Image (cartoon, rainbow, N blue to C red):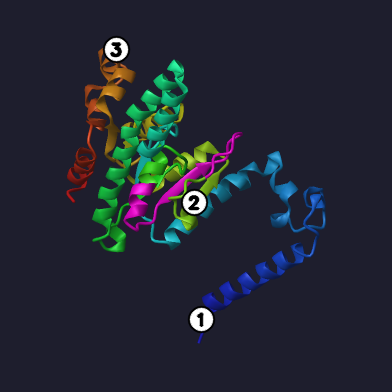
């Protein structure tokens, strides 16, 4: 016999279903976005998009991905950041062929850069395969899942590597003026889209057991320093922070200057791990957790 909790859940679900059915009686045209006092508050798009309801929208962006991931046993993730502009080796090869055929010196120079950076795509893909291979032999509570921003470039590469071994992969995408669609290797049921960068970054950290940052631009730096700050200030549990591509990172950021100027402590340098191979990146994580 169903207990009172189950009965309450069924009744609540039925009431919500009835309410939603009532909403669907209205025509699905432009009038839906017009003010309507009679419409149910939670099913009123115009009301939910008001400035005053921003707090509710933030709560929803917190709750929806959290519940969905928990229901699918996604408890531990390895977050991979990096440039959305790095092509796959296949794409880079095609761009080079096209540039050489054109004879345009500038196009050839750009294509060569793409070929050079495509190695990072391949390395991210191989790293994700190592994570997925490990998790395939673990119980659900010990599995590690690849989580990315869900877009192209390095994000696609990491999702692709895990997907190739049959592992679910998470994508936390962001709505931008220039639409960025989820890459095809994100598991559809784990493909989330955010409006608020802050909520997206919070979700990156909520399940993260490691962060692997490949060469990238402003977005990558933003996410990287967010994690470093949270770990340094002990607002988040210590996690391995791996910088893939030591030449790029040491050329871009001279962390030692911060120590020399006294703005960070010498011990803070230990928060960062520079690596140049997928195996080394995975080894840093394995040693940290004694896997």
Name the residue carrying label 2. Answer: 191
Residue 168 in percent (x, y) is at 39, 56
Contact, mark 2 vs mark 3 (Cβ under 8 Å): no
Quick one: label 2 or label 3, which is nearer the N terminus? Answer: 2
Rendering quarter of residue 244? top left
Q: Residue at x 29, y 36 (%)?
A: 241
Quick one: label 3 or label 1, which is nearer the N terminus? Answer: 1
Q: Nearer the viewer, residue 287 or 30?
A: 30
The residue lying furthest to the top in this view is: 261
Report the Cα–Cα distance between label 3 and label 1. Answer: 64 Å
Residue 246 in percent (x, y) is at 25, 26
Report the Cα–Cα distance between label 1 and label 2. Answer: 34 Å
Name the residue carrying label 1. Answer: 3
Report the Cα–Cα distance between label 2 and label 3. Answer: 43 Å
User: Label 2 neighbourhood size at 10 Å, few (<14), some (14-19), many (20+)?
Assistant: many
Q: Is residue 211 magenta?
A: no
> Helix, strand or loop at disc 1?
loop
Contact, mark 3 vs mark 1 (Cβ under 8 Å): no
Residue 69 in percent (x, y) is at 44, 56
The residue lying furthest to the bottom in this view is: 1
> Helix, strand or loop at disc 3?
loop
For the record, the magenta segment spans: 160-181
Quick one: label 1 or label 2, which is nearer the N terminus? Answer: 1
Contact, mark 1 vs mark 2 (Cβ under 8 Å): no
Q: Residue at x 37, y 31 (%)?
A: 229
Name the residue carrying label 3. Answer: 261
- 77 lies left or right of 27: left
Q: Residue at x 37, y 53 (%)?
A: 163
Relative to 130, is 247 above or below? above
Q: Residue at x 22, y 36 (%)?
A: 277
- 99 lies left or right of 16: left
């Amino acid at each position: 016999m169903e207990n009172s909790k189950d009965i309450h859940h069924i009744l609540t679900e039925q009431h919500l279903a009835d309410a939603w059915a009532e909403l669907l009686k209205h025509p699905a045209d432009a009038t839906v976005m017009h003010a309507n006092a009679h419409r149910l508050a939670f099913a009123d798009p115009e009301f939910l998009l008001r400035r005053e309801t921003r707090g509710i929208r933030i709560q929803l962006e917190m709750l929806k991905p959290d519940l969905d991931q928990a229901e699918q046993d996604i408890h531990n993730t390895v977050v991979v950041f990096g440039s959305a502009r790095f092509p796959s080796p296949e794409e880079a090869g095609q761009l080079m062929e096209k540039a050489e055929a054109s004879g345009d010196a500038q196009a050839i120079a750009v294509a060569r850069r793409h070929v050079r950076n495509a190695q990072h795509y391949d390395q991210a893909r191989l790293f994700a395969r190592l994570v997925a291979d490990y998790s395939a032999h673990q119980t659900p509570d010990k599995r590690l899942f690849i989580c990315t921003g869900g877009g192209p470039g390095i994000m696609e590469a990491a999702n692709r590597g895990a997907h190739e071994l049959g592992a679910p992969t998470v994508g936390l995408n962001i709505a931008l003026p220039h639409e960025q669609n989820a890459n095809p290797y994100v598991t559809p049921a784990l493909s989330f889209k955010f409006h608020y960068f802050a909520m997206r970054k919070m979700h990156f950290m909520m399940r993260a057991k490691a962060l692997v940052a490949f060469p990238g631009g402003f977005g990558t730096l933003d996410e990287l320093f967010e994690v470093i700050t949270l770990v340094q200030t002990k607002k988040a549990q210590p996690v391995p922070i791996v910088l893939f591509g030591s030449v790029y990172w040491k050329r871009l950021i001279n962390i030692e200057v911060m120590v020399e100027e006294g703005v960070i402590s010498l011990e803070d340098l230990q928060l960062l791990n520079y690596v140049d191979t997928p195996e080394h990146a995975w080894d840093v994580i394995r040693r940290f957790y004694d896997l």
